[in-house]
Structures are given as C-alpha cells and as structure tokens.
Amino acid sequence: MPLKLAVLISGGGSTMINLQRNIQAGSLDASIPLVVASRPCTGVEKAESAGLTAVTLSPKSFASTDEYSQKLFSAVRDVEADLVILAGFLSKIIIPEDFANRVMNIHPSLLPAFCGKGMYGHRVHEAVITRGCKISGCTVHFCDNEYDHGPIILQQTVRVDATDNADSLAERVQSAECEAYPKAIQLYAENRLLVKEGRVHIVNES
C-alpha cells in the first residue's frame, strides 16, 4: 500500500506540490490524504486545486500548544497517516509517543548549523551569507520536540557564490530540497531507514 502522508503547511505549499508531483510521476510511493494549514494561506488553495483534502487548524484557537497538538494529531490519526511531513510549517507542536520517528522536516541549512527558534526561510540564507560560508544546503531529519533537532536522514549541499543574496541562495537550496525530501520519504516507504542510538542508518545503501 502507498505510504499515507499528512502534510503540514503554513504558506505557499510549494513543498507539498512538489511531493504531489513526485507521487503523480510514480517516483514517490505515497498518497496525501490530508493537508493541515496552521493559518489561512495560498497553500490551502493549491492543495484543493490539486484534489487534496485541506483543513485550516490555527493554534490561536487553542488554549495551549498541548491542546493544539492533540487536536492536530487526532486529525492525522483519523486518516490513518503513516508519516507526518512538515512542509514550511511554522507552528510549534508536541509530537506524541506514537509518532516518534514518524514526523519529518526539511531545514534549509546543513544542520546543526543555522538552526533553532526563529531560524527559517530567508533568515537562514542571510545568516549563511553573512558568515561567509562557501557551501550550504538542506537537511531532512526526523523531528523530536526540540527545534531543528532529531536524527538526520539526508543532507544535500549547494555552493554559495560570492555574488549570492538571500534570494539567489534560497533558489538553489530549494532545488536541492525538491530532490532530497521525496528521496527521504521514499526511503521511509521502502522501510530502509533504521534509527539506532540517535543516528539514521540507510539499509542497503549503495
């Protein structure tokens, strides 16, 4: 059976659409029975245009992060999702025990560099350029209940040119993300990711 993904978004939904395209192309053995947005955003419209079920669940409607997380994961369980995909999702959630190593995120840097609370999007790329890094990239990792933490699955590098600004570097990193995220999810679908002592081992890696 295809892997069931619950995709969480907060913005334009480009990562979600990239995953759906990979599914339609046959390179990702999965389906997306649920998209959850943390706020009204264009990603919801894109999801619905792609024929996906999308709901908006705002943390502002709940008394605490814990209550919000319980409601969100209840919706995820209702569709029997195998894996939760954070796709530009900017709201804090508490991952329950039954979803340990079942929530993935992609971060636009080579973790553990340039991460933590408030480090997302162009803020990351600006920090990379300011620091004078010669390479950057993206990291796919399993999530725990710390920001940008949890076992690393895949990393992909990109060059940083002397003439780069945040926009040009973001474009290059996003291209890497479009390759790395579906690849990591497919490895999960093939049961080839083994987490041992906080490290991810890829089974039968060539």
Image: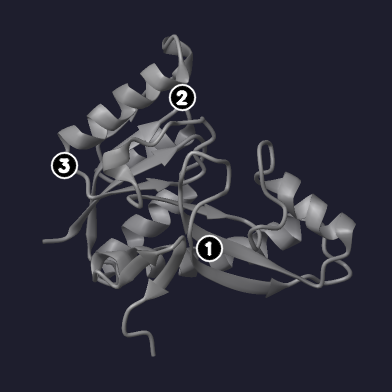
Q: Nearer the viewer, mark 1 or mark 3?
A: 3
The amino acid beneath tag 1 is Glu
Disc 3: which residue: 80
**Separation of marks 1 and 3 at Cα, in angstroms:** 26 Å
Callout 3–callout 2 Cβ contact below 8 Å:
no
* Identity of the residue drawn at 33% across and 68% down: 194
Residue type marked 3: Glu
Instruction: Measure the C-alpha gap from mark 3 to mark 2.
Output: 24 Å
| Residue at (40% x, 52% y) in the render | 17
Can you say which quadrant of the picture contains the C terminus? bottom left
The image position of residue 50, as x and y in percent, is 30, 46
Q: Residue at x 37, y 58 (%)?
A: 19
Viewer-nearest of discs 3 and 2 = 3
Of marks 1 and 2, which one's residue comes earlier in the chain?
2
Secondary element at image label 2: loop
Q: Which of marks 1 and 2 is in front?
A: 1
Residue in the foreground of this view, choosing between 153 and 5: 153
Quadrant of the snapshot with the N terminus = bottom left
The front one of 163 and 73 is 73
Q: Cα distance, mark 1 to mark 2?
A: 24 Å
